[in-house]
Image (spheres, rainbow, N blue to C red):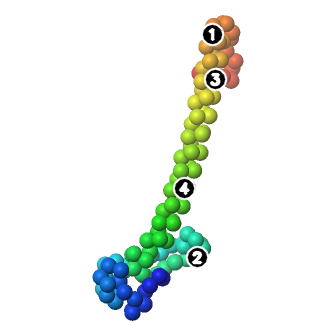
């Protein structure tokens, strides 16, 4: 990907890349977060870092959006429950009969 030619230097050992003989030479499968194209390739783990950091950032943003959406739903349900409880307390105080479709 970024430097997988035999003559390229390893950033860790400052020697030619040993490819499959090196523990940092790994296979990545999935979609490129920049282009969406399918990726199934071996390369140095150091070379994969920028791509993996971009993917990680995208996943964190999606998680943050999901948590915020869930929080908004919880707040809405809490506010509705508080309003229902206030209406029930008012009805009991005024001794009004309950409506048949109300929650208890």
| Measured Cα–Cα span from mark 4 to mark 1 | 47 Å
Name the element at disc 4: helix
Q: Residue drawn at (60%, 20%), measured in percent from left and top?
A: 85
Residue 72 image point, x, y percent: 60, 40
Q: Which residue appears at 42% of the width and 90% of the height?
A: 5
Residue behind mark 2: 37
Q: Quadrant of residue 37?
A: bottom right
Circle 3: is it few (<14), some (14-19), or many (20+) Cα within 10 Å? few
> Which label lies toward us, 3 or 4?
4
Residue for badge 4: 61
Query: Whole-Å distance between the Cαs marked 2 and 3?
Result: 50 Å
Q: Position of residue 87 (x, y in %)?
A: 65, 17
CA distance separating discs 4 and 2: 21 Å
- Marks 4, 1: nearer the viewer: 4
Q: Crowding near pointer 1: few (<14 within 10 Å), some, many (20+)? A: few
Disc 3 versus disc 4: distance between alpha carbons? 33 Å
From this view, report whether residue 84 is shown above or below residue 38: above
Q: In terms of sequence position, does the residue under pointer 2 or pointer 3 come before the other? A: 2
Disc 1, disc 2: CB below 8 Å?
Answer: no
Residue at point 60%, 26% (across, down): 81
Earlier sequence position, callout 4 versus callout 2: 2
Examine the image and state in which quarter residue 22 appears. Answer: bottom left
Give the labeled residue for mark 3. 83
């Amino acid at each position: 990907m970024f430097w997988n030619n035999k003559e390229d230097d390893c950033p860790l050992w400052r020697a030619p890349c040993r490819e499959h003989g090196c523990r940092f030479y790994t296979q990545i499968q999935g979609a490129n977060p920049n282009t969406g194209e399918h990726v199934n390739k071996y390369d140095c783990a150091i070379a994969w870092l920028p791509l993996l950091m971009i993917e990680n950032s995208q996943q964190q943003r999606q998680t943050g959006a999901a948590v915020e959406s869930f929080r908004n739903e919880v707040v809405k349900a809490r506010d509705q429950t508080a309003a229902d409880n206030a209406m029930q307390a008012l009805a009991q105080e005024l001794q009004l009969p309950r409506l048949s479709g109300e929650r208890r």
